[in-house]
């Protein structure tokens, strides 16, 4: 009888060690679904969804705390991609979230170089120095509009982006649009 108890105790200890090793060796950092959701989002970090950036929004969607239709810059393509990923029915974009694509423009004659727009831009699409004129790198601007409110002289305006061929981008393989132009590859 003591042999059986000893054998069971030894077997339990070995299995416990194996489980402990497996827990350490195969530990998953973060939520893999949140990672995939974050890859689908446009990475504008604009906060229009009610979260401080794309990653917190992705984590909230993965936990079921937020709906998939709150990303205004991503629009319907992102909502569809999220619905496909999560196996849910597509839903219309949240009311007030749909807006035309825009890009910031600074009236350089009025700019006083206060740098408040530089601090507000989540993607560093504005360049300039203190007490010098600032300008927007339109290829980098996501159109979030976060730079407009802090401007004390109201020299930043949001201009609509035309959907002509000069602004067209190849979509990602999952169908979501690219927001940043890719450099052309020179052929010899």
Image (tube, grey):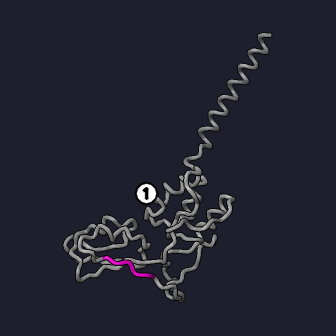
Name above or below for residue 26 compared with residue 73: above
The magenta segment is 156-160
Q: Give how far across and how far down residue 166 sits, in percent.
A: 50, 88
Q: Which residue corresponds to mark 1?
A: 52
Secondary element at image label 1: loop
Q: Nearer the viewer, residue 132 or 19?
A: 132
Residue depicted at x 60% and y 71%: 77
* Residue located farthest toward the left when viewing the structure as drawn: 131
Please tell me whether residue 157 belongs to the stretch shown in magenta.
yes
Please tell me whether residue 10 belongs to the stretch shown in magenta.
no
Q: Give how far across and how far down residue 87 sits, in percent.
A: 69, 59
Q: Give how far across and how far down residue 85 sits, in percent.
A: 65, 61
Residue depicted at x 30% and y 69%: 117
Most frequent secondary structure within the magenta stretch: strand
Residue depicted at x 67% and y 33%: 18
Residue depicted at x 49% and y 68%: 96
Q: Is residue 75 left or right of residue 46?
A: right
Q: Is residue 57 left or right of residue 7?
A: left
């Amino acid at each position: 009888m003591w042999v059986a108890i000893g054998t069971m105790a030894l077997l339990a200890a070995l299995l416990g060690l194996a489980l402990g090793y497996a827990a350490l060796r195969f530990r998953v950092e973060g939520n893999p679904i949140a990672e995939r959701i974050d890859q689908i989002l446009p990475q504008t970090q604009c906060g229009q969804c009610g979260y401080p950036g794309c990653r917190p929004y992705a984590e909230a969607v993965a936990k079921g705390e937020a709906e998939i239709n709150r990303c205004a810059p991503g629009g319907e393509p992102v909502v569809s991609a999220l619905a496909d990923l999560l196996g849910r029915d597509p839903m219309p974009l949240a009311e007030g979230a749909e807006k035309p694509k825009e890009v910031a423009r600074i009236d350089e004659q009025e700019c006083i170089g206060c740098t408040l727009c530089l601090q507000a831009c989540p993607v560093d699409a504005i360049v300039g120095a203190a007490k010098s004129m600032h300008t927007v790198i339109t290829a980098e601007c996501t159109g979030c509009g976060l730079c407009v409110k802090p401007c004390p002289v109201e020299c930043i305006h949001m201009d609509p982006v035309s959907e002509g061929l000069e602004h067209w981008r190849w979509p990602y393989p999952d169908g979501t649009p690219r927001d940043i132009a890719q450099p052309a590859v020179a052929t010899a």
